[in-house]
Amino acid sequence: MNLARKKARQMVFAMCCLNPGTTIVWTCHSMDAMRDTMAIFDEISLDLSLFIEKLSRAHGEERLIFINGSRIYFGARERGFGRGMSPDVLVLDQADVMSERTERDMVILGAYGLTIRL
């Protein structure tokens, strides 16, 4: 397991719990990677269900909603996910496989807050 990814997941979850109304966009390169990440957050949310209002796995609506109003949106960059959003935190999982165009799109998106590259 990639320790950086594990720590990032823990940090993102803690940020959402401790900072009401936080919006996080977690992008992966592919749908497969996004589904894997979503499954891990699903497991985490079972252990910490006290903080979770809803976990949505509906196609195009993948998100984790906290009782304090924080949200984590999940999506794949290969499908254009993330454009037009203005999150507090942008997570670029698999950042090493971004095309130049995608990187430009994501840099603009990340200009609004903290950007984490994994």
Image: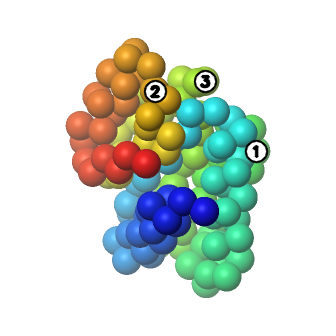
Q: Amino acid at mark 2?
A: Met
Q: Position of residue 91 (x, y in %)?
A: 42, 48
Q: Is residue 39 above or below residue 66?
A: above
x and y percentages locating residue 16 in the rendered image? 43, 68
C-alpha distance separating marks 1 and 3 = 16 Å
Confirm or deny contact between disc 3 and disc 2 (CB under 8 A). Answer: no
- Mark 2 neighbour density, 10 Å: few (under 14) some (14–19) many (20 or more): some
Tag 1–tag 2 contact (CB < 8 Å): no
| Residue 63 visible at all | yes
Secondary element at image label 2: loop
Q: Earlier in the sequence, mark 1 or mark 3?
A: 1
Q: Which residue is mark 1?
A: 58
Give 74 or 56, whichever is nearer the viewer.
Answer: 74
Q: Which residue is mark 3?
A: 79
Q: Which residue lies at the image location 54% right of the left edge and 23% below the top edge?
A: 80
Which element carries disc 3, helix, strand or loop? helix
Residue identifier under label 2: 98
Q: Earlier in the sequence, mark 1 or mark 2?
A: 1
Snapshot quadrant of residue 58: top right
* Residue 39 picture quarter: bottom right
Helix, strand or loop at mark 1? loop
Distance between the alpha carbons at the discs numbered 1 and 2: 25 Å
Q: Nearer the viewer, mark 1 or mark 3?
A: 3
> Is residue 20 placed above or below 86 in the rendered structure?
below
Q: Please name whichever residue, 33 or 63, is drawn nearer the observer in this view of the structure.
A: 33
The label nearer to you, 3 versus 2, is: 2
Residue at image location 60% in from the left, 24% down from the top? 79
What is the three-letter code of the residue carrying label 3?
Arg
Examine the rendered structure and indicate whether residue 95 appears above or below residue 5: above
Farthest-out residue, top: 101
Assess disc 1: are there few (<14), some (14-19) or many (≥20) residues with their C-alpha within 10 Å of its C-alpha.
few
- Viewer-proximal residue, 39 or 7? 7
